[in-house]
Every structure is written in C-alpha cells, then in structure tokens.
Amino acid sequence: MRHVNGDEGRLKSEADEPGWEVDPDDDWGVAVVATVGRQLRLRREAVGMRAAEFGVAVGYGEDLVYKIEGGKRIPRPEYLDRADEVLGASGLLSAMKEDVAKVRYPKKVRDLAQMEAKAVELGVYECNIVAGLLQTPDHVRTVIRAAQPPYSPDDVERMVAARLSRQSVFERDPAPSIHFVLEEAPLRRQVGGTMVWRQQLERLLEVGRLHNVTLQVMPTNTEAHPGLDGRIELLKFPDGTAVGRSDGAFSGRPIADPRHLRVLELRYGTIRAQALPSRESLAFIEKLLGET
C-alpha cells in the first residue's frame, strides 16, 4: 500500500486516485459514501488513532483520509481491506466493499441495470455498436478506451465493470425473454483486432443459442427502417408496466406513458420484421466467423 509509483514511503494523495470523487447528483451514492466514511472515522477514533497515524498505516495522506471519512471520496476496495486490518474491525469494514462497488458504477448505468434485472421481457435494437449486454470484456475495454478525450485507467475499469455487471441478466432464474436486433456493419468492424473480434462473434453465437434469447441481424442491403435514428430499448415488467427509450424519440429519455410506448413498440416491431430471422442471423454470424 505504501509503494506508490515506485516512490518508497510516499503516501497516496488525490492525484494518485483520479475518478474516485463522489457524484453530487447521485443522492444514493452520496448517502452510501457518507455512511461508510462515518463508520471508518468512528472505528478509527474508537481505537484512539489520529488520522495522520492511520494514514501512514494504510499508505494514504492525512488529507485524503479526512476526505474519505467525510464522504467526499469513494474508498477503494483495498483501502477498506487495509483499514479493516489496521483497525481490527474483524471484517466489518471489508464487508462494505459490496455497497461501495455499486456506487462506483455511474448512476445511469445502475438505474438501467436495476430495470433490466426486474424485466420479464427485454427488446434491444442497436445500430452503431454491438449491444452492451452482448459485449465481451475485451470488446468493452477497447470501445471505452477509444473515447476522446480518453478516460483515466481507473475510470476505464470502472466503466468496464459496470457494463459487464448488466450481463447477469442472462443468469436469472426464471430467465427473461430477450430479443436483440443488431446491424450488420458493426459485426464486420474488427474492434480490438482479429482475436477480440472472433471472440465477440463467438459470444454472439453462444448467447443467440440460449433458449430464452432471439438474436437477429439487420443486413446492410435492406430498405430504410425506423431504427436509423438510433438505438431502441424496451423493458416489460411482471406487473404489466413497461419502460422504453430511443435515441431518436422523446429526447432519448426513458418513457412509461402507454401512448409513447406504442410508438417505440411499433418501430421495434417493424425493425424485427425487416431483420433476418433468428436461424438465418446465426448462420450469417457463423459465416462472418468463417471468413477470418
């Protein structure tokens, strides 16, 4: 913990951990980090340890210790483990890592993941990329690293973890019904190089063969369709309610009004009707894989 960037004995400061600030607009995140920080402070004070002394023990500067305890910074998992050890908390501080990990995911991703985790039916049309629910870890990492201006390494890994966490939807029991329509062009783009691209196509075939998943490909030589404005996602829940959103409608915001949902359902239904059937779509992906 006390070896930072190869400098013996130097304690970590904010500059060493970019991207771990608390989002002030994330009310739940703010509350979680404040609670964790308060517990860290109370535990430290209970053993009679000053912040500076504790900082030396865990490899962090005093100012950063105060900011974590004050709920201004999100503590890294290893910080909680080290604090648990130094303060003799018997695993109580380490146990907070699960809640803190959720805070590290951007709020909009958490909200989406929570909705997907409850849906009994999911419909996704993606026009420019492979849908996030279908991306392999290497594919996700390559796409996020391509952003300009670039994200910090910490932010890249946080965003990768957030996107991959949504894929737990495939492990649910009972399994939801999931439909995907993907454009041909992104499937041909060798994101990350040949091996990463092959692994991505293999992942599409693996998921597309699941009993609860329908995967369709929209060929580039098809007529114009109502998905040209951008992605569409439709989620339906056990109580009969639904939520949808589309890049090309209602300012891209999630909508639940039945009248607006009918518009998205009509568009999505038209897209599915124009795409290749499931069996032909899997054969198409197999052909792409065989071309490498």
Image (cartoon, rainbow, N blue to C red):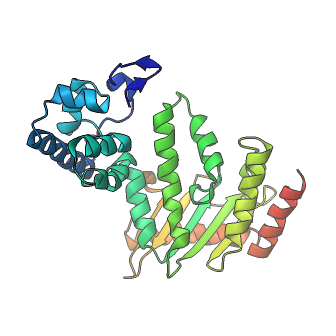
Q: Is residue 166 visible?
A: yes
Residue 288: percent from left, percent from top: 84, 57
Q: Is residue 242 above or below residue 289?
A: below
Please tell me whether residue 232 is drawn above or below residue 7 in the rendered image: below
Q: Does 166 sit left or right of 118 as displayed?
A: right
- Left or right: 2 in relation to 235: left
Q: Classify 210 as above or below 79.
A: below
Q: Position of residue 98 (x, y in %)?
A: 35, 55
From the viewer's side, name the closer residue of 199 and 227. 199
Residue 11: x and y in percent read 32, 22
Q: Residue at x 60, y 47 (%)?
A: 140
Most extreme residue toward the right, as rendered? 291
Q: Residue 63 appears in which quarter of the rendering?
A: top left
Q: Is residue 197 left or right of residue 154?
A: right
Could you say which is closer to the camera, residue 244 or residue 16?
16
* Residue 215 coordinates in the image, percent (x, y): 68, 69
Q: Quadrant of residue 255?
A: bottom left
State the residue at coordinates (30%, 55%): 95
- Is residue 25 visible to us here? no
| Residue at the image position 41 percent from the left and 72 percent from the top | 118
